[in-house]
Image (cartoon, rainbow, N blue to C red):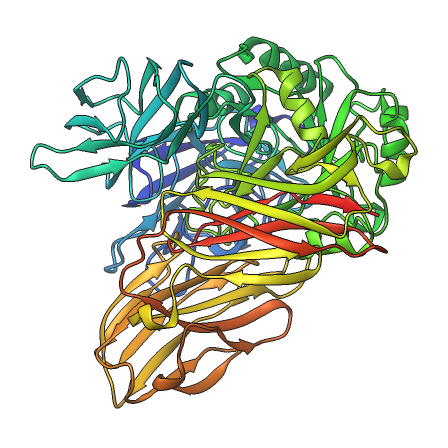
Amino acid sequence: MPLSTYLPEEMGSVAIAPLGPVEAGSFQSFFVIYTAGKFGIDDSGSLKIVHRFASDLGRLQMDDPEGANYVSAQASNGAVLHMEYDLKRNFRPWDKTLYIKVVRGFLSEGDRIVIRIGDRRYGGPGVRMQTFQEKEFQFRVLVDAFATYDYVELPDTPSIEITSGPPVIYKAVLPTLKRVGETFLLGLKGEDRWGNPSAKCEDTFRVTSTRPVENLPDEISFYPGQASVQIDGLRAEEEGDLCIDLVDMDGNVAARSNPLRIVAKTGGVSFWADLHGQSQETIGTNNARSYFSFARDRAFLDATVHQGNDFQITSEFWDELNSLSREFTQDSRFIVIPGYEWSANTCLGGDRNILYAEEGRPIYRSSHALVEDTRDLDQDANSVEELFDKLKGEDVMVFAHVGGRYADIRRGHDRKLERSVEVHSAWGTFEWLVEDAFEMGYRTGILATSDGHKGRPGASHPGATRFGAYGGLTCLFADDLTRADLMTALKRRHHYCTTGCRAVLSTKVTLDRPADRFDDDPALGGPPDEQVTEAVMGDILRTDAEIATFEIDIHAAAPIERIDIRDGLRLLETWRPSEAEDMGRRIRVIWEGSEYRGRGRETVWDGCAELSGNTFARIAPINWYNIEKRLDLVSPQRVEWSSLTTGGFIGFDAWLDDMVMGWLRIDTPLVKKTIAVQDIGREDICLEAGGLGRRVRVYRLPEENPHKRLKLARKIPLSPDRDNALYVRITLEDGHVIWSSPIYLVP
């Protein structure tokens, strides 16, 4: 659908050579050879050679034979061909299209068109392969033999296997909150330069811990063919924070884990989840079984959800997803929550994510746009109002999402069902959606997901596409790792989220008198659940207290750059661990924001920074995930870059030779400004650029920042006539950001 099905076996054949395997992100050259079938191809007929939307294969071009990604085509009978490449000239998910038209002559049966993808004959490097692994990378071939623009897809398509490269970094992953004596798992892996778990590791490391850990081996070895190692059955018998290191044979730390906090046996713990991603059955990469396996065994998640676009989910695939959910769910080990992405056009409410408490529930699609079987058309919910109406009575949690489409929560919101909004994914950072919720008086939690399309839930490196951000994660507080407990945590907003890092975070409010605590929004009219004097993140309290004590406890793997303490739309305080006298020769230059809310939100920041009367000693990138984008210190006085943002921030640190002398010139398409070096201090210099939070920020940092763990407490006066929504936004020096769900203090 919606291609012609007329005699596909008579429309010719296609072969690819060589067949691989090839390394992800490497430059290659290969042939796609089409042989005409019984009908040939008539004058002005054409081929479409298509590959997936999710692929970040180098953009094919026909203009520069000496450049990367050059493509040529030749007909064996001398027919004249015309080629174009378009990112969206076919039906999703096979959007990306190499179009080849016979513009003079025709093809007969047996004639061939030889397409050289990554043609190296003129000095070019070849085509850069997609940057992530795929067992069967396909070019599908569609034939318009009769020059009617009615295409038939060839039935057999050969494929190329794309594999990981050698490791450039090792990672050690722990949970973040466990009880004394409770067993836990350490996940270990090497990643290639594009973020793929490497199957080419061949190293041995000593394993050390900052606190005693039972059953921790002294040494661990990686062998070729292993993409990860898991050490289970670990246990700590004393409270406190610990990290685990991998130390190479020269005594260098190759990887340090995220911090793990061991707490008393009473109380809840935390679990990490990626609540949104897709597989090849919709618009992603690799199949759904591989998706769940990766989340568990490569990303070391506790839980995940497959969120395919509803208008691509057939009834058969919905049944398969429910079956896989049952199969992969194992209490205390790994939980799959059944669900889907309701993907209506923005004018009808935009994207929502549906999470069910159990399998076997209906799928209420926004449309049947790419689902041929319309027998269940009466179950469709075309608008967000219809969706919420159909979900009434279901044991379900909904959150608002921003992808290509964005959720218009001003158009529709259900306080009972829609418990959170998404602040970050691989599509970017969307704090404006959180602000929409505050402006409308909604009482929602804040979460982050990957919305990954590259088959890497929980470790969603953006690769080389316009997905410029690393995928997000959500940390859920629950008593135990069961689906019921995780759903309760989601409904109560007991979670925080990050741009992909794992950190320990708790926030708490203490009052001087009892308050009513609600699990559900009290605007729904239900009774309180209990009376308390303390609240944790996500809680809703009704109180007449005048002052609240707001406590923050954070332990991260990277130094803390700043903590923004917020009350809904109001910034109460920006707290930095370093004082003005601690500032060194290091400045940070970052650019951030997006064009607008929709698909074209990308903002291009290609530009440079120049020093006069001073010099750059060195630079270091911040959030520079796409290694195809340039960041170069081209001279002691000039930095050049190519970069784009989709809401979050990217930039660099620069160490100057002098912090008094000279001028810094910033030159981008949106911002051009000269700043005196002596004016760059601890506080941000903001150069606004319109759009949604678009700006350049320049500020000074200490040479070294040792502050990875901090505790803060603030006395906050409460407004008696509006919601007080207390939460934090924490920025780490490595570029990661952490958001807590608000604690709502309601008059």
In which quarter of the view is residue 113 placed? top left
Residue at image position (16%, 33%) is: 247
In which quarter of the view is residue 368 placed? top right
The front one of 401 and 164 is: 401
Q: What x and y, as percent, mark residue 383?
A: 87, 40
Residue at image position (51%, 80%) is: 671
Q: Residue furthest front?
A: 512
Q: Residue furthest left?
A: 250
Tally the marks.
Answer: 0
In this image, 226 relative to 279: left or right?
left
Q: What x and y, as percent, mark residue 699?
A: 41, 72
Q: Is residue 697 above or below residue 410?
A: below
The front one of 683 and 248 is: 683
User: Quadrant where the N terminus lies?
Assistant: top right
Q: What x and y, as percent, mark residue 32?
A: 39, 39
The answer to whether residue 621 is seen in the rendering is yes
The front one of 1 and 278 is: 278
The answer to whether residue 383 is seen in the rendering is no
Q: Is residue 292 above or below residue 510?
A: above
Q: What x and y, as percent, mark residue 511?
A: 70, 42
In this image, 49 relative to 461: left or right?
right
